[in-house]
Amino acid sequence: MSERIKKAKQRYKIELFAAMALYVAVILAAKIAARQVEEGAVLTALALAPMAPLVLAGFAFFRFFKNMDERDRRVSADAAGLTLAIGIFASLMAGFLDAFDVLVFDDALIWFGPFLIILWGLFRIMLGGRDC
């Protein structure tokens, strides 16, 4: 593995970890702040605030993706396909369980994105990704 790819991998890990930690912090802070805010523009801004760290994580990934070799891009694509399939089934399952009042998933959707990111990472490891 080239020195350029090693540096890109290290940068990606730092940026992704920071973005995910910021995501959790922003969600918690926004939920607490939203209790004291009435409906309107401020509440809308608080509700959408957690999107900013996810955008940062997306930029970090695509910057890293440009530095991958063909093999790692293939592993990433295969992992993304498996993640998509499992994500669809998981969301349908949760939706049906909620619709039939078997389980109630309050605020479940705010954790679905990180769930998919973690799942994708696990599939990359299982499929032999070198940058895990």
Image (cartoon, helix red, strand yellow):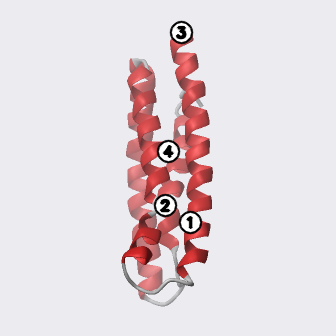
Q: Is residue 45 left or right of residue 32?
A: left
The residue lying at 55 percent from left, 41 percent from top is 16
Name above or below for residue 99 compared with residue 119: below
Q: For the residues marked 3 and 4, what is the alpha-carbon distance in whole angstroms? A: 24 Å
Q: Nearer the viewer, mark 2 or mark 3?
A: 2
Q: Amino acid at mark 2?
A: Pro
Residue pointed to by mark 4: 120
Gap in angstroms between the C-alphas marked 1 and 3: 37 Å
Dot 1: few (<14), some (14–19), or many (≥20) neighbours within 10 Å?
A: some
Q: What residue did someone put label 1 on?
A: 27
Indicate which disc, 2 or 3, sits on the residue closer to the N terminus: 3
Residue at 56%, 37% in the rendered image: 15
Name the spot of residue 90 as percent of width and height, x first: 46, 65
Q: What residue would you read off at disc 3?
A: 2
> Along the polypeptide, which appears first: circle 1 or circle 3?
3
> Which of pointers 4 and 1 lies earlier in the amino acid sequence?
1
Work out whether 113 lies above or below 131. Answer: below
Residue tagged by mark 2?
Answer: 50
Q: Amino acid at mark 1?
A: Ile
The image position of residue 62, as x and y in percent, is 39, 34
Q: Which residue sits at x=52%, y=36%? A: 124
- Counting residues from the start of the chain, the first of labels 1 and 2 encountered is 1
Label 3 Cα crowd, 10 Å radius (few <14 / some 14-19 / many 20+): few
